[in-house]
Image (cartoon, helix red, strand yellow):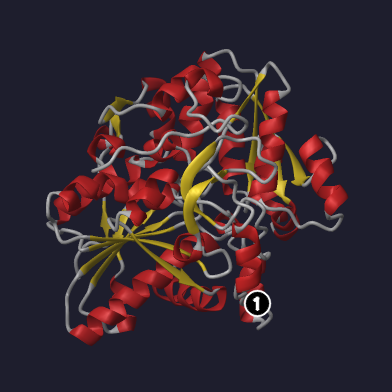
Amino acid sequence: MQERKITLSEKEIPRQWYNVVADMPNQPSPPLHPGTKQPIGPEDLAPLFPMPLIEQEVSTERWIDIPEEVLDVLALWRPTPLYRAYSLEKALGTPAKIFYKYEGVSPAGSHKTNTSIPQAYYNKISGTKRISSETGAGQWGSALSFACARFSLECTVYMVKVSYEQKPYRRSMIETWGAEVFPSPTDRTQAGQKIIAESPNSTGSLGIAISEAVEDAATHNDTKYALGSVLNHVLLHQTVIGLETKKQLEKAGEKADILIGACGGGSNFAGLAFPFVADKLAGENLRMIGVEPSACPTLTRGTYAYDFGDTVGLTPLVQMYTLGSSFVPPGIHAGGLRYHGESPLVSQLVHEKIFEAQAYHQNEVFKSAVLFAKTEGIIPAPESAHAVKSAVEEALRCKKDGKGETIVFNLSGHGHFDMASYDAYLGGSLKDYSLDDKLLDSSISKIPEV
C-alpha cells in the first residue's frame, strides 16, 4: 500500500493568494448600497473594514502577496496534509481514488484560521482596537478569537443562540483565547432587541448575528467588522487550500476529476475549488461540487437575486443565491451551513454552470461521517460531513459505472466539539427537516426589488 499522507515542506506554503475574479468569464455584479440601492465604492465599506481588506475585496489582480507576518502564523500548521482514503475506498468497494485535504490540524480545528489571521493582521496595522463578528457553529468565532489573541486585538463574538446552547465547548474555546461571546439575538444591539421583540424565543440565525455584529462595529469608532465567509477577500484567503492541493496531487502523480466541499457561505469549498477554475475553463473535464443541507438549501432551492447579507438590512445588497434574508433555518447541527445566502462568487459560478450543487439531510450525512470515522479515524465536523457524504455518493457511482475517477474533498474541520450531534444521531433522536414550500415562498417574496 502506498503512503497515505502527501506532504509539502514549510517552504512550499503558498506565498500568494489566488483571485478567481481575474479568470472568471464574466465580471461579478457590484454590491449595492442598502439605502440607495446604487453601486457602492470603497469609501462605503470603510466604516466596517480596514482599507487593505477593502482593496482585496474589489481587486481584479490574479495574484496577491501574503504578508510575511501572516505567513509566520500560517506556518504553525500549514501546509496541511492531503490523505489518500484507502480504508474508505476498500469499505465502499469502489474503483475510485479518494483524497481528502485535512484542515482540522489548525489551532482552532478548522479552515477558518486561514482568513482570521490575515483579517486580524490587516486590522492591527490599520489601527483597529476591537473586532466584532458573528459565528454559527463556533468555528469562525474560535478562529477569530485565536487570531485576535495573536495580534493583541479585542474581540466580540455574537454566536447564534441555538449553537451557543448546542456547542458549549466551542464557546469555551472562544473565551479561552480572550474574546467575549454572546448568544444572538441579544439585547446589546438595536437589531437584537428588534428580533427579540418580534420573536422572544428566537433560536437565532447567522443573518441575525451578522446584523448585531455589523451594528456593533458601525457604532464604535475603534471597532471593525470581520466576516468568516461569503465576501471576496475571505474566499481569497482560503485559496491556500486549493493551491497546496494542486501541488500535492502533482507530487502524487494524480489529477482530480471531482472536487467537493461543504457549502454554507462558500469559503471552504471555494478555497479548494477556486485554484482549479482556470483549468476547467481551459477545457479540463473537472466537476466541482458544493454540498449543503436540505434544511437550508440555498444553492439548490434558492433564487439568484440581489439580497441583504443580514436579517435587518444593514449590509450591502449582493447578487447571490438566497432563501431570503428573513429566512431562519431549523436548528440543524451543521451550524456553519445555516445561512440564507451564498458567496456572490460561488453563486455566480453555480449560475453559470461552472460549479454544481447538491443537498442532503443530516441523518444520511451523519451516516457517512460515522463510516468515515470508522475507516479513516477522523471524526468530521457536521459541516465537513456533508462533503464526506457527497464523496461517498460519487465513489458509489464510480463503482456502479466501473470508473476509476479521482475524488478530492475538503475535510474542513474535526468534530471534537460537536459530539452532542453524534450523540443525537447514534441515539436515534436526530431529526431531518424538509423545507416547506410555503415558508420558502414567503421568505423569497420579501427579497427587495432591485
Residue 381 visible somewhere in the drawing: no
- Residue found 61% across the figure and 21% down from its top: 47
- Residue found 49% across the figure and 41% down from its top: 318
Residue 248 x %, y %: 22, 50
How many discs appear? 1
- Residue found 20% across the figure and 79% down from its top: 95
Outermost residue to the bottom = 400
Where the N terminus falls, by quadrant? Answer: bottom left
Residue 326 x %, y %: 67, 53
Q: Is residue 119 left or right of residue 172?
A: left
Residue 71 x %, y %: 37, 28
Residue 432 visible somewhere in the drawing: yes
Secondary structure of the residue carrying tag 1 is loop
Rendered view: 398 above or below 97: below
Crowding near the residue tagged with mark 1, few <14, some 14–19, many ≥20 C-alpha atoms within 10 Å? some
Q: Which residue is mark 1?
A: 430
Residue 400 x %, y %: 24, 86
Q: Is residue 325 left or right of residue 181?
A: left
Rendered view: 53 above or below 157: above
For badge 1, the amino acid type reads: Leu
Location of residue 79 by image quarter = top left
Location of residue 100 by image quarter = bottom left
Q: Nearer the viewer, residue 240 or 288?
A: 288
- Residue found 65% across the figure and 57% down from its top: 327
Q: Nearer the viewer, residue 445 or 329?
A: 445
